[in-house]
Image (cartoon, coloured by chain):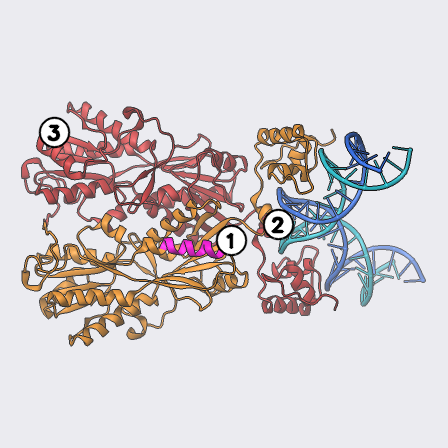
Chain colours: A orange, B red, C cyan, D blue
Amino acid sequence: MAKTHSVKRGMPSLDDVAEQAGVSKSTVSRILNNRLGNGFSVKEEVRQRVIEVARKMNYRPNLIAKSLTMHSTQMIHIFGGSHALSDLGNIYQTVVNNIAQVVDAVSDGYDVTVDMSRHAPDESEMPAWRIDGAIILAQCTRPTMQEIVQMGIPYVIVNGRCPQEGCSVTPDDIGGTRLAVEHLIELGHTRIAYSGPLPPYSTQTSAQPPIRVAHDDCGLEADVLVSHSSLQDRYAAYVETMERCGLEPIVSAHDKTGSAEAYLKRKVFERGVTAILAYGHMGGLHLLQAAHTLGVSVPEQLSLICFCDEYANRVMSPGLTFIDLNAAAMGRIAAELLLEQIRNSGAGSRHIVLPEKLVIRKTTAHPNGASVTARSGRERSY
Amino acid sequence: MAKTHSVKRGMPSLDDVAEQAGVSKSTVSRILNNRLGNGFSVKEEVRQRVIEVARKMNYRPNLIAKSLTMHSTQMIHIFGGSHALSDLGNIYQTVVNNIAQVVDAVSDGYDVTVDMSRHAPDESEMPAWRIDGAIILAQCTRPTMQEIVQMGIPYVIVNGRCPQEGCSVTPDDIGGTRLAVEHLIELGHTRIAYSGPLPPYSTQTSAQPPIRVAHDDCGLEADVLVSHSSLQDRYAAYVETMERCGLEPIVSAHDKTGSAEAYLKRKVFERGVTAILAYGHMGGLHLLQAAHTLGVSVPEQLSLICFCDEYANRVMSPGLTFIDLNAAAMGRIAAELLLEQIRNSGAGSRHIVLPEKLVIRKTTAHPNGASVTARSGRERSY
DNA sequence: CAGTCTTAAGAAACCGGTTGTTTCAACAAC
DNA sequence: GTTGTTGAAACAACCGGTTTCTTAAGACTG
């Protein structure tokens, strides 16, 4: 017994177990991984002994070493948590949860991790381990994308622009916007405003990818995707629909200094707006609260509609009429698409566009205080 | 030129670069890592050539192999995302964001990832790569804890019970509960109910760690920590404070079938309750909405207070009076504690208990509809 | 009793890096 | 002319697993 089992800090290695059990490490490896048959066998007695020793030593394989040879880690990594999950109540938390749920449900035993660190635009976000699949929330840095493609890692982009060869799931923001505007027009509104950040090129801002800005005056910062396609799509579809219907688009640059109350005063009181389409859930919520404060009754005097995830809306503000982005479905589909690609790597590229749905609740109605519209027999308990 | 640069799929390795540049791989390694001096040197010309070749080949080190030898990955991993982040609006999203923010801010270049997968209680949650630090949200499985300790990985537990030798950050739920109850009593309330899940042993439930239950009837499931200490602490402190003040505690098992409206009817109408302390933010919100629906005016007829994170409250329901768990500070402190431990591994164990704060907004007042209390000159715009 | 087939298990190469040690040439010193 | 020193770079071991290849010993066959 030349070597005593050294008490070095850390986990016991395969060698340690082998030594204790009096066999070679390859034997231990095969026993613990159940790689019997195929030109290898052990006596049951030895097998039991090795297993027992491993258990006693509390042996756990070093997964780093393992993945070095196995070229697989059973890990699915989600990129973009730092910009997608940093503010409360957006769609991405639902997306991520549904991805994790779908992945957990399949038996293959994949694990899901989310990257929460911020990265410079010229920096790779790739983690230190090999990943078997990638989900990209909205977007990732260019080096990241390069590496993913170069290593041949299956990926799905959720709610973001995607190279032709890749897979993506995106909501149909243009269709959704039309739905919203047409709903308001059908109700009889003509003075319909759009409230939200304007797409960058129309405000001279040339800022590229995510930049860090103070997030709605509450001290916490959040990454905002200055050039996300939804900015462009919703804005353009709004203008297009309004003009198609012969109505004047009413937009203004999202004013960070002015509060929702100031916005309401400007639009509703001064410009006769009777309905507002808000870019996001939080914006909608703030407008709703501002209306409350100012004594503007919703929906009698003002109709309000916003883009939102159904789950977030139900939990946080039941009552708001909204355009459902169907975040849960996006997450599920993304996960399924990814697993499909992982299983048979031949699976080609697919770009899925998910229709958005208009969900009518209690914040839209005829202008001028008609209580309940004829065509939608919904209850109003306001 | 015997070997041509093989077009095998995947990233070029150190060997590939070495071959192209006509040097050995150790030379490449040292050049790219700037490990000059210390018994090693290269001609500037060679150095330039190697760097150029690496750039041209788009070489990126395989971080798995790297961390195998380096015993360090610059990675901080957050455990417990699946139970902590699966429902919207709880404190953990704020915790995680603040951790990431603090870690990103230090120059050491650590990355933060979150585990979102669900794990069986007897399963290790350890990722496939080595981590330099761990944050545990509320709790992790026993094997995970074992491994963390055995490998000597620095860790901090956020809002959960912690072994004596470890580090933890927890809110002072007992103090916070007292603050809430005393606030209500000072206002003049005597019929104060506690609404929330009761600690397991008092309801015969013997369920252990996180179990999966349907989450508030909206289809999505969520892990609920059936035996989290806050259940016990808030409940016990409530009962204790009430009894100390000679008042009758009013509790009932959290009734999943009954809605918030049914609860309100039972308590307010039938048992004369004038104030409710809700266990969580969502509970508080639902009670508020139910009160609205039932025509119970808040705070004139019913005072409402709940436990919540300040940021979530501001964003989702400004107006609710609440006990601030100070999630942002918990996150920041946890991150700092962890970084401290990583830097000098001698740093001992510390258990930080964060005081909770009472934040008075618009949902608590004198019983019987007194409009503004004398002692707190807050505006009420209701 | 030699030859072949199983069974049981070990040796060694490999994954892709890092790093301690060695080699080799050129040049300086004695 | 031999020895020392230094600069430049290769060699080889190692991290902790997996896997291919090989070997040793018995069992079976003819």
Tag 1: Cα neighbours inside 10 Å, few (<14), some, or many (≥20)? many
- Please give the range of residues in magenta: A331-342
Residue A209 in percent (x, y) is at 39, 66
Asked if the stretch drawn in magenta spans residue A339, the answer is yes
**Residue A283 vertical placement versus B327 (above, below):** below
Tag 3: Cα neighbours inside 10 Å, few (<14), some, or many (≥20)? many
Asked if the stretch drawn in magenta spans residue A175, the answer is no
Q: Secondary structure at mark 3?
A: loop
Residue B376 in percent (x, y) is at 13, 41
Labels 1 & 2 near each other (Cβ < 8 A): no
Chain containing mark 3: B
Q: Secondary structure at mark 2?
A: helix
> Rounded to the nearest whole Å, what is the CA distance between mark 2 and mark 3?
68 Å
User: Residue A63's quadrant in the figure?
Assistant: top right
Q: Which residue is mark 1?
A: A131
- Which marked residue is nearer to the observer: mark 2 or mark 3? 2
Magenta portion: prevailing SS class: helix
Residue A68 in percent (x, y) is at 60, 50
Q: Which residue is mark 2?
A: A69
User: Do marks 3 and 1 share a chain?
Assistant: no
**Viewed as shown, does residue C26 lie left or right of A271?**
right
Q: Which sits in the foreground, B367 or D15?
A: D15
> Rounded to the nearest whole Å, what is the CA distance between mark 1 and mark 2?
13 Å
